[in-house]
Image (cartoon, rainbow, N blue to C red):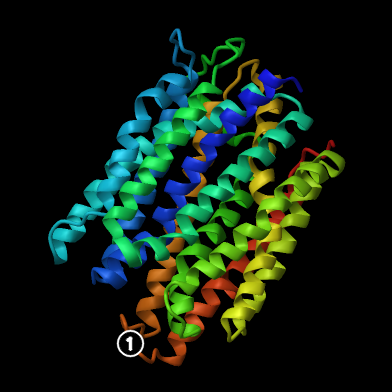
């Protein structure tokens, strides 16, 4: 690997810091902020998050299809990133400056997140769709995916583990401004490494037929169902840790930083290890092992009672989570390569778009599940003593419910038909 090639790979990978910072800060703290801090009823925020998930899901295939068919002197993907990053950072900031109370605050929240959805999908889908085009061998993809996830984990640490330290000292609004500025800087770095090859076969298949071709691909169907189940657990984990820390462990809110930080600090070196394993075992076998490691590590959340024990558990979660972060897009890239043999076209946009369409329902399912559990178990905002049902609900949403989802994911990854190394 020469210096210029390494520089391009590193610059491209840097964008994942911004993606994960914005996505994880939003997913982890937005429900907690609007429910537990601002006092909006849980069912209203759950409703807004379900609507957000539906809109986000629908935008993914539309932007993917449009991106595959875009022609410009900058390429198919680059223009969407170039003109979307500044408005995206601005909308992320606005989310943390609430306007109104009660139902007015609910409508404000819903309106802002829907506009945020449009910009987030426009930028992130095109950024992700460049990965299979720019990096074409399993060795190259494993290396770049490892780099991307290293940057992504740093973004997660900033977006998930640091907010309690920032908002407790400076406030939620300042946190939004600072994080948006960091994301914008790394998005700009990403643009310098995102020059397209310009050799991809043009996509000409009409929209409806493109959808049919995509879902006729058995490898994609097995992959995307497994990915959906994994993404559901990804959304559940950071969203519930603040509740778990505050009410189950009876610890201060900043202890969430310890648990979330343990996950990502342990995951950071393991992305390199999983990158090496996928070159030896192939994507299918490696992802099954990663899911099982991740699932086993979540189960102790059902019974740990101290911050120290919970931190050890969280660290073990980071081992399997690192593997899944590295492997999911490598598998999807493999699916896209197989599709090109059938269609003679490169359709990264529609595949990443349909993947986004499916997995975004995982975020909505998480919001719906957590809202239902909070409402049905008698959770009361800021109560010194929650009901035993509510305490078990917090544990189940970190251990039992994700374990069931991950067992199903193993089944679909087992059925994934591409077996080559």
Query: Residue 175, position in %: x, y?
Result: 34, 54
Return the residue at label 1: 383
In depth, the one of 396 and 256 nearer the eye is 256
Circle 1: element type? loop
Task: Residue 243: tell me if it is visible.
Answer: yes
Task: Residue 221: tell me if it is visible.
Answer: no
Corner quadrant of residue 167: bottom left
As displayed, is residue 138 above or below residue 34? Answer: above
Who's the residue at 36% across and 85% down the image? 378
Give the side of residue 330 with respect to residue 245, left or right.
right
Give the side of residue 113 with respect to residue 198, left or right.
left
Give the side of residue 280 with respect to residue 88, left or right.
right
Corner quadrant of residue 25: bottom left
In depth, the one of 244 and 183 nearer the eye is 183
Query: Residue 374, position in %: x, y?
Result: 38, 77
State the count of labels: 1
Corner quadrant of residue 109: bottom left
Query: Residue 219, position in %: x, y?
Result: 69, 39
Q: Say few, some or many: other residues with alpha carbon within 10 Å of mark 1 (under 14 / 14 to 19 / 20 or more).
A: few
Q: Quadrant of the N terminus?
A: top right
Who's the residue at 55% across and 35% down the image? 14
As displayed, is residue 226 above or below residue 192? Answer: below
Query: Residue 264, position in %: x, y?
Result: 60, 58
């Amino acid at each position: 690997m020469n210096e210029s090639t390494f520089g391009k790979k590193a610059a491209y990978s840097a964008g994942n810091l911004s993606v994960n910072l914005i996505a994880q800060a939003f997913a982890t703290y937005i429900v907690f902020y609007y429910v537990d801090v601002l006092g909006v009823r849980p069912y209203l925020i759950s409703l807004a998050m379900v609507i957000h998930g539906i809109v986000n899901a629908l935008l993914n295939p539309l932007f993917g299809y449009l991106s595959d068919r875009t022609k410009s002197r900058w390429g198919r993907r680059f223009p969407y990133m170039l003109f979307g990053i500044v408005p995206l950072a601005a909308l992320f900031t606005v989310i943390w400056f609430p306007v109104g109370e009660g139902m007015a605050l609910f409508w404000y929240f819903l309106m802002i997140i829907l506009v945020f959805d449009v910009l987030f999908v426009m930028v992130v889908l095109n950024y992700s769709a460049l990965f299979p085009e720019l990096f074409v061998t399993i060795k190259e993809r494993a290396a770049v995916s490892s780099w991307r996830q290293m940057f992504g984990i740093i973004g997660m640490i900033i977006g998930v583990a640091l907010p309690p330290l920032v908002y407790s000292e400076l406030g939620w609004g300042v946190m939004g401004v600072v994080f948006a500025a960091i994301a914008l800087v790394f998005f700009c770095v990403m643009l310098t490494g995102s020059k397209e090859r310009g050799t991809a076969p043009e996509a000409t298949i009409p929209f409806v037929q493109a959808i049919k071709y995509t879902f006729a691909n058995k490898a994609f169907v097995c992959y995307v169902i497994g990915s959906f189940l994994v993404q559901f657990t990804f959304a559940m984990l950071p969203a519930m840790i603040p509740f778990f820390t505050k009410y189950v462990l009876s610890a201060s809110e900043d202890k969430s930083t310890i648990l979330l930080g343990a996950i990502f600090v342990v995951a950071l070196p393991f992305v390199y290890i999983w990158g090496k394993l996928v070159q030896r075992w192939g994507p299918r076998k490696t992802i099954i092992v990663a899911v099982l490691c991740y699932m086993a590590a979540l189960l102790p959340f059902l019974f740990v009672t101290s911050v120290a024990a919970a931190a050890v558990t969280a660290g073990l979660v980071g081992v399997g989570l690192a593997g899944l972060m590295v492997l999911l897009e490598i598998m999807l890239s493999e699916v896209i390569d197989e599709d090109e043999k059938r269609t003679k076209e490169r359709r990264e946009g529609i595949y990443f778009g349909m993947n986004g369409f499916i997995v975004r329902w995982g975020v909505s399912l998480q919001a719906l599940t957590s809202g239902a559990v909070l409402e049905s178990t008698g959770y009361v905002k800021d109560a010194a003593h929650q009901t035993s049902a509510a305490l078990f609900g917090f544990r189940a949403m970190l251990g039992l419910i994700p374990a069931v989802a991950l067992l199903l994911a193993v089944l679909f990854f087992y059925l994934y038909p591409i077996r080559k190394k």
